[in-house]
Amino acid sequence: MSIRIAIKQDSEALSKLVISLAHFYQEKPSEPLPKWIMDTLQPSSFESRINHSGYLNLVYEESSEIKGYISIKDTSHLYHLFVHEESHGKGIARQLWLRARSHFPESHHYTLRSSLFAIPVYSKFGFYKTDSIAFKDGIGFQPMAFNANA
């Protein structure tokens, strides 16, 4: 097991990982993902974020296979946190979250838009709800925040 900085060669695997978990963030998993979200999940979009200085992208690898991924935007917005379905409940998300936070010791406040499925996970990390649940084109999300000083 290792956590490392994502590289552009990870882009295709990251795209496949996040798309494979769509049923956890879609209101109706049988429906196709909306274009606006599919555009953000293409390998080229992952490569752009990996190459962009405003994002920290980390992967969790086990036996040379990516099992988890986290992306922090602008040092304070948890943009993505995904763990392979077979690896849920093994602490991978927490390890990624703690490692990502260690890259920004000066940041004490984080925001995110959690999938409805992941609200309990983020709550365990100390995130709290900041607004009502919202839906956009069949994608449900809960705005949340984390304050390390709370």
Image: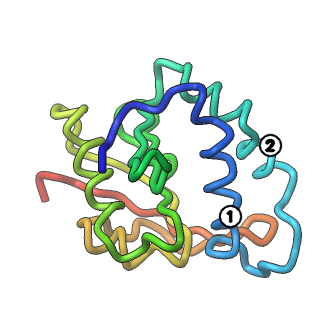
* Mark toward the start of the polypeptide (2 vs 1): 1
Report the number of discs.
2
Snapshot quadrant of residue 145: bottom left
Q: Residue furthest front?
A: 63
Snapshot quadrant of residue 4: top left
Which residue is tagged 2? 39
- Which percent across, then down, holds residue 21? 63, 67
Residue at 28% over, 61% down = 94
Which residue is tagged 1? 20
Q: Is residue 83 above or below residue 56?
A: below
Q: Which dot marks residue 76?
A: none
**Disc 2 residue type (three-letter):** Asp
**Disc 1 residue type (three-letter):** Ser
Numbered disc 1: secondary structure: helix
Q: Residues within 10 Å of mark 1 (few under 14, many from 20)?
A: few
Residue at 70% over, 33% down = 45
Relative to 31, is 43 on the left or the right?
A: left
- Which percent across, then down, holds residue 135? 70, 70
